[in-house]
Amino acid sequence: MSQLKTASAPTPPRRSWTLSLLSLHGLLLLGALLTLLPYLWMISSSFKPNTEIFSATLEFIPREPLLENYRTAVTKEPTLRAILNSCIMAGGETLAVVLTSIFTAYPFARLRFQGRDALFLLVLGTMMIPSQVTMIPTFILMRWLGWIDTYQGLIVPRMVTPLGIFLMRQFLLTLPKELEEAARIDGCGRLRTLLQVLVPHLGPAVATLAIFTFTASWNEFFWPLIVVQSSEMRTIQLLIAAIKQAEAVDWGVVMAVVSLSVFPTVVIYLMLQRYFVKGIAMTGLKG
Amino acid sequence: MIPGVPLSLAQRRPPEGTTSQTEVQVQPSALTHTRPLVTEETRFAWLSLMPAILFFALFVGFPVIYSFYLSFHEWNMMAPRPTWIGGENYAELLRDQLFLRSLLQTTLFTLGITVCIVVFSMATAILLDQKLKQIQLYRTIYYLPAVTSVVAIGIVWLWIFDPQYGLINQLLRSVGILGPRWLADQQLALPALIMTAAWRNIGYFATIFLAGLQGIDIMYYEAARIDGAGAWGCFRRITLPMLRPTTLFVVIMSVILSFQVFALVYVMTGGGPAGATSVIVFYLYQQAFTYFRMGYACAVGYVLFGIIFTLTLLQFKFFGKQVEM
């Protein structure tokens, strides 16, 4: 597991106060418990038969754990299709955002041209605009293009993000200029310099951006809610919201679908945690 | 290498295939340090920016303008074109009780969640800043909700708040208390939403506060200790003032995000009971996609934009003075 830089540095006790070790552990444990409890409740419910779900006694460990809810979730509900849709949307968006961020950030970080700084400020300024303001005209545009209820309708309006451009630019600025200069002297064109000399060094930034974009897109609700109309095109988030709207909520099945939907992002996070920490450090923002 | 002067182009072998008229002309002027009107560098820069420029024009520029235009029109998307009605949409907003109520409830939600976040995230960050062997594990756990989707969290908490079989009321029952109806209760629905949102966001903002804490030089604490300052004194005189920029950032982010709360409301209450949790964006969504009042919804969007913009500026003005951003 990765460590924050400051945490691993062997500094003497530095804080203003040292809480007594016992109360410190107690508080941290309480917080961890409060954080984990909803997850445990979700997983526990997803393995319970209906008789146990609707039972007056509180039990975390199902008496007769069963996979029935998961079986129903993948056979009766279009869960797998929804997961596939989410994968296509999040994957497409991630690929697009990484590519456009590299090409857009490069001139801002490395080239000199008139109006560069003003243009960059303008790009950052678009972060101030709430998506609800642009949503309706974008929806009308999608309708005019015939992109309602399509993958391109889900992906294209989110292909460029100011955050991605910002993150990539910050990272490019940390790379030494000599890197490209050597290649330029050897007569390498700008495009080739970018693709063959700089891009191989962008690994950590690309990983951070890709993870943030994928997670954010996987979790996105608002835009898919507007663009998707048929039940086949539903993303996993839309499916969860839809089966909850059903007349009689079958909580066991709902919790099974929710568990399946949460699983990928949690696994990505646990495996690639250092990139999340880096992302926050670099931008102070969520993707 | 003199900064600001391009690599002497004369030394360079012409790049294969791309040698153009301009580049040949560039060479003498580069040697005399005057720059031609359009250099190869400028050309490449704009070319590289072109996709993003087109994107922003189409998906930000056009929508921002068109949305403003529509906000002065009436349009249900069926009619061939929008009808001009002047400022009627904005005038109607001022009379619209449900809108005003949504505005008030959004404000309450924002206030509640922002106070929760500042207090609990800062406290959590201080806990997470202690030197313990297991601290990394705690940091990992506390951040978990931030990577979980709002929809999933909303559903799980909906189930936790279930009056009969939910976790909270089951726990309360086990100690002999009859729990309230939470999301079905007009008084408690909004606080329950705030609780859920706080649960999701505290760990995320604690990570930001933690970064702020780790930027404070230990020398201040050591000096204070020599001067005999206690724990509370250190917190008030050092930690709090030094965290000012971080706090400002957290408050601004929290306000911006909370004013746009939508998915949580959509999933957990649908604006109910009896409109008790209707918030601005939920109201906007209903106007646009339930009643197809596109012009009116755009007016709501612009009011939201105005509020967020004004609040951000105000926070900078009042709290940003002593802050060096």
Image (cartoon, helix red, strand yellow):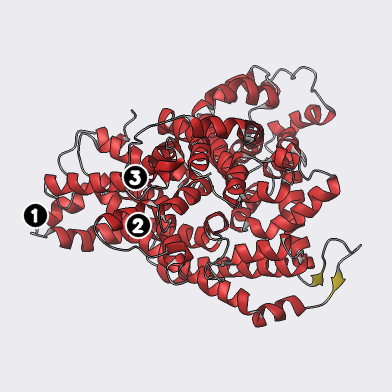
- Seen at 46% across and 39% down, the residue is A279
**Mark 2–mark 3 distance (CA, rounded to whole Å):** 14 Å
Mark in front: 2 vs 3: 2
Residue B41's spot in the image, x, y percent?
71, 34
Q: Mark on residue B169?
A: 2
Kind of element beneath mark 2: helix
**Mark 1–mark 3 distance (CA, rounded to whole Å):** 43 Å
Residue A267's spot in the image, x, y percent?
45, 30
Tell me which corner region of the image, top left, top right, bottom left or bottom right, holds residue B272.
Answer: bottom right
Q: Which residue is mark 1?
A: B226
Q: Which residue is mark 3?
A: A37
Kind of element beneath mark 1: helix
Q: Which three-letter amino acid code belongs to the residue tagged 2? A: Asn
Q: Is residue A269 visible?
A: yes
Label 1: how many Cα within 10 Å (few below 14, some 14–19, many 20+): few
In the image, residue A144 sits, relative to residue B50, either above or below, namely below
Viewed as shown, does residue B113 lie left or right of B291? left
